[in-house]
Amino acid sequence: MEIFVRGAACISPQDTFRAKEFLTGIQRYDQGYLTCIEPYYKDFLPVKTLRRMSRNIKIAVVSALECLDMAGIEMPDAISTGTGLGCVENTEKFLSPVLDDEEQLISPTPFMHSTHNTIGSQIAILLGCNNYNVTHAHKNLAFEDALVDSTMLIREREAENVLVGGADEITHEHFDLKKRINMWKKPPNNNIDLMKYTSGGTIPGEGAAFFLISGHQDKRDYARILFVSSIYNPGDNEAIEGHILQVIKEAGLRLVDLDLVILGNNGDADYDSIYYYLTENLFNAQVVACFKHLCGEYDTSSAFAFWTAINILKIQEIPPIMRLNQCKRKVIKNILIYNQNYNRNHSFMLLSKA
Amino acid sequence: MSHRIYITGAGIISAIGTNVQQTLQSILECTSGVSKIRQLDTIYRDDFVAGEVDCSNRGLSDLIERHDNNSCLTRTSMLGIIAAREAFQDSGITDPSDMRTGIVSASATGGMDESERYYRDTSKNQFIRAHQVSDSTEKIADYLSITEYAATISTACSSSSNAIIFGARLIKHNILDRVLVGGTDALSKFVLNGFRSLMILDSEPCRPFDRDRKGLNLGEGAGYLVLESEHAVTRHNKEPLCELAGYANTNDAFHQSTSSPDGKGAYMAMDKAMDSCGLDADDIDYVNAHGTGTESNDLSEGLALKKIFHKEIPMFSSTKSITGHTFGAAGAIEAVLSVIAIRHRLIYPNMNFSSQMEELGFSPVTELIRDIDLKHVLSNSFGFGGNNSTLIFSRA
C-alpha cells in the first residue's frame, strides 16, 4: 500500500514557515544554540489559548494547523507526535519551585502541561479530535516511531489521513545543564561552520515539523514514503551498512536508484565517523547532504530533515548549503535520510517522488 | 493482519510486592500497599499516603544483582529492570536474538527522581542523561541484551497501555516476532507536588467510585509483558498465559487535566476495543477500571461504564486502592494484574468503598472473589491530555 505526504509545515531556526524560497538566506547563530524563527502566533490562535502554551507547544500546534490547512484536511483520523524531551520549559517552570521554595506555593498549570503528550493533546482539543492520539518519545527515534505508527494505522485501515509530526525545544536552562557534561561545543562557534569543526560535542537546536500523510494520492502530494525503520545498538559500521542495504532492498530499489542521501552529521568528531564511513564505502554515486547546521541537534531534528527531503522531491532542487559533495543527478527520485545519536539509535527513512 | 497476540511472560513490582508471587500473596491476604511515605524525601511525608515500593534505591540495586556502579540507574530504571527481567524469565527467553525481539516501554516522568537531585548539585552530573523518559527503556534493553528494536511512549497516565498496543501492532505488521512491553515510573517530588497543586490527592487511602471519594493516592512501580506472535509461540511450543485480544486508543479532546463529564473518550475507547476483537458488552467478565478516586475520573468513567454496559454492569474494581496510582506504569501494572486475574481465577477488591455514587446506581466489587472463571477482562487507562486507552485480555 502506497503512502503519500500531502501537507508539510515546519517552524525552525531557518526561514521555513510560509517561506517564499526554499532554504536561502541562511541564519547564523553564534550564541551556542539555535532557536526558532517564530511566526506571529496571533494569526493562528486566540490570545487566551496562546497564554497557556509554552514555546514547544506553540511551534508544534501552529505547524500542525498550518499543515492541515495546506493539505485541505479539517479532521485527521489520527494524531501521532514525536518529541524526545517533551515540554522542557514547563517541566523547568514546575521543578524550580519544588526545589527552591521547599515544595510550596506552586501553580499546577506548568505541571499539567509538562507531560510529553501535551502537544498532541492540545492539537486534539483545538480540533475536537477524538481519534487515535499517541506520543512517541524515544530520543532521536521519536519522530520516526510516530511515522511508523502512522503508516501502520493507514495499512490497518484505521486511518486514511494521519497528522504526524515532531517537536522539541531548547531552553537556556537546559543548554546550561547539558553544558556541564560537555555535550556542546565550546565557544566560540557558529552553526554555519558546524561540519568544519574537529572537536567533540555539537550545537543544539530546536524545531517543529508536521505532515499530513495519507493512503490516497492527491495532486498536492510532496512525496511517497517507501520505508521507515530503526535499529537499536547495532554495534559496528558494517551492521549499519548491512541494514541500509536491507532497507533499500525491502523498498524494491537498488543502491544505484538512490539519488540523494541526507545524513545526520552533527559536527561531533567522536560520533560522526559512521557518516564518513558510509560516504566513502557506500554512497559513491549519490548526492550526499547534511542538515543539522541549519536546525541544530535535537531529538526530532529528523523531522526537519524529512521536511527538506520532501521539498527537494517536490521542487527538484537541492539547496547548495546542504551539499557535502558535488555529485550530479538530473532527477531526484529517491532519497534516504539516515540519522543516529551516540551510535545507539539509528534511523532510516526512504522517500520517493510523488 | 489476522495474527493473534499471545502473552507468554509477566513481571511486576509495586507497593504490594517485588514480583508476581509476592503480588499474588498480598492480594490473597487483601493487603493494600498504600501507607505512610517512607522512601521519598518530601516535606509532605505526614500529609499524604502513597503506594511506594518498600525498598531503598540501595535495596533495589541489590535486587538487580548484576550492577555496574557507573551505569547511572535511576529508581525508574531499576524498577523497570526488575519487572522486565521477571517477564523475560517467565517467558523462558534465554537468547533474545533467536527471533526479532524488541522493547516498547513507557514512562511519564523518566529519571525525574534523580533530576531533582542533580539539578542543583553538580556532583550528580552523571544522571543528566538519565533524565529523558526513554533512558529507562535503553537501560532495560541493555540489561536484557535486546538490540533489535527499542521504542518509548509517553502519554502521561495511559503511557504503558499505549506501549502495549504499539508493541502488539509491531507484531501484527511483521516488524517483530516478540516484544517486551510495559512501563515504569518512580515517585518523585515533582509528581507528588504536581498532583498536590492540582488538589486531587487524598490524604487518606483513596476510595475509588465512592460517593465521598476525595482524590487519588500516588504509587510507583513497573509492569512488563512479553507479547509473541502465533508463529513464535508455536515455534517454541509455549503455553501462553493469555491473549491480548483487543485494544483501542481514543482522545477525550475535552481538557488537559479533566475528563469530559459524560466520559466520551472513555466510552469510545471501550467500545472500539470490544469492536476490535468482536466482543459484545456481555462478554466482558471483569473490568479493571482506571478508577483513580478523583471526583472527575470516577464520574466520567462510571458514566461511560453505565452507557456501554447498560443492561448489566460487569464486576469491576479499581486496583489503585491497592497499588496507588503509578501514573506512567499504571496501564502495565494493571495489565499484569489482569493476566494474574485470568490465570489465578480472581477478582480484586476495590478497597475502602462504602457508599454508592448517586449518579451511577451501581458499585464495584469490594471483597476478593476467588475461583471465578474469567474469559475476558477489560482494563482501562486514562491520562492527562484526554488520552483514553482500553485493553482486553482473554483466556488463551
Image: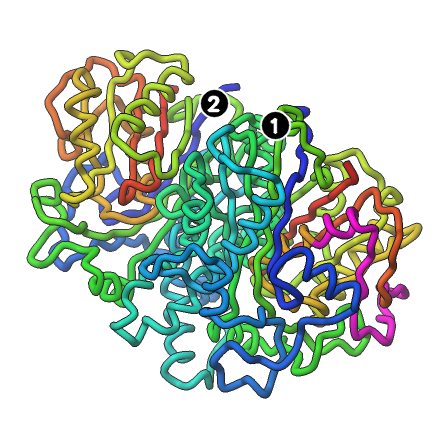
Give me the residue at 64% from left, 73% from top: B217
Segment colored magenta: B337-365
Image vertical order of residue B264 relative to residue B52, above or below: above
Q: Quadrant of residue A265?
A: top left
Give me the residue at 28% from left, 24% from top: A241
Image vertical order of residue B158 relative to residue A252, above or below: below
Q: Is residue A99 magenta?
A: no
Give me the residue at 65% from left, 68% from top: B324
Element under label 2? loop
The amino acid beneath tag 1 is Ala
Q: Which mark is residue A218?
A: 2
Residue B55 left/right relative to B369: left
Q: Are marks 1 and 2 on the same chain?
A: no
Image vertical order of residue A239 relative to residue B72, above or below: above
Chain letter belonging to callout 1? B
Between A129 and A351, the residue placed more toward the observer is A351
x and y percent of residue A10 in the render? 34, 43
Q: Is residue A72 visible?
A: no
Between B50 and B252, the residue placed more toward the observer is B50
- The overriding secondary structure of the stretch rendered in magenta is loop
Which residue does the numbered mark 1 point to in the structure image? B232
x and y percent of residue B288 in the render? 75, 56
Split into 4 quadrants, where in the image is the N terminus of chain B?
top right
x and y percent of residue B265 in the render? 68, 52
Split into 4 quadrants, where in the image is the C terminus of chain B?
top right
Chain letter belonging to callout 2? A
Between B245 and A321, the residue placed more toward the observer is B245
